[in-house]
Amino acid sequence: MSTSLRLEKITPENVDAALDLRVHPHQEHNVAPVVRSLAEAYAFGEAAWPRLIFDGEELVGFLMAFLDIPWNEEKDPADRRSGLWRLNIAAAGQGKGYGRFAVEAVRDELRRRGARQLYVTWEPGENGPGEFYRRLGFRTTGEVSGAQTVGVLDI
């Protein structure tokens, strides 16, 4: 993994590059495109934390965290969670440690904000990211969000 990895906010100068970011074709059904994530970030305001991942000057990925949102208000209004909402690594950047960097960056940000756990959901099945998250220490909670598996990492 490169030592020149960094996160950047989405700006007028880099938004077009963000919108052009594409995951590997066999992963497209697992994650929403960046354009949808940016629309959701706008709608959710301060509860969304979108960032671009750069390796030097090269855009290699996009992540978006969710911050302190109600999980299931009807069941438990006090259950508020933070975690990784989206992770899009460019097709050419797969297997280079960018995904691990992204998860660690979200973990560090949540820790800085006082969170004790990092949640993530993923599409189960072949070519899904479940094994990736398990290798990073996530455990399944037994919950399902939509059709997605819910995982948690203690931070």
Image: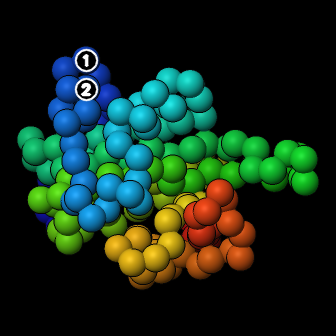
| Pick the front one: 27 or 92 | 27
Answer with left or right where residue 53 lies relative to residue 109. left
Q: Position of residue 57 (x, y in %)?
A: 9, 41
- Above or below, 121 against 134 in this view is above
Are the residues at dot 1 and dot 2 in contact (C-beta closer than 8 Å)?
Answer: yes
Residue at image position (44%, 50%) is: 86
**In x, y percent, where is residue 42?**
50, 24
Which residue sits at x=25%, y=17%? 12
Please state the horizontal and vertical placement of residue 3, each as a whole percent of the image: 16, 60
Q: Secondary structure at mark 2?
A: helix
Which residue is outermost to the left?
A: 57
Q: Is 62 located above or below residue 119 in the figure?
A: above
Disc 1 residue crowd, few under 14, some 14–19, many 20+, Cα 10 Å: few
Answer left or right for 8 relative to 146.
left
Of residues 71 and 147, the one nearer the viewer is 147
User: What residue is rendered at 71% in x and 76% in y?
Assistant: 142
For the question of whether residue 110 can be seen, the reply is yes
Occupied quadrant, residue 73:
top right
Residue designated by label 1: 12
Quadrant that contains the N terminus = bottom left
Q: Position of residue 101 (x, y in %)?
A: 31, 61
Q: CA distance from mark 1 to mark 2?
A: 5 Å
Above or below: residue 11 compared with residue 53: above
Identify which residue is drawn at 58% across, 64% down: 148
| Labelled disc at residue 122 | none
* Quadrant of the rendering where the C terminus is positioned: bottom right
Q: Mark 2 sits on what residue?
A: 15
Residue 112 visible to an observer of this rendering: no
Residue type at numbered disc 1: Pro
- Kindly state the secondary structure of the residue where label 1 is placed: loop
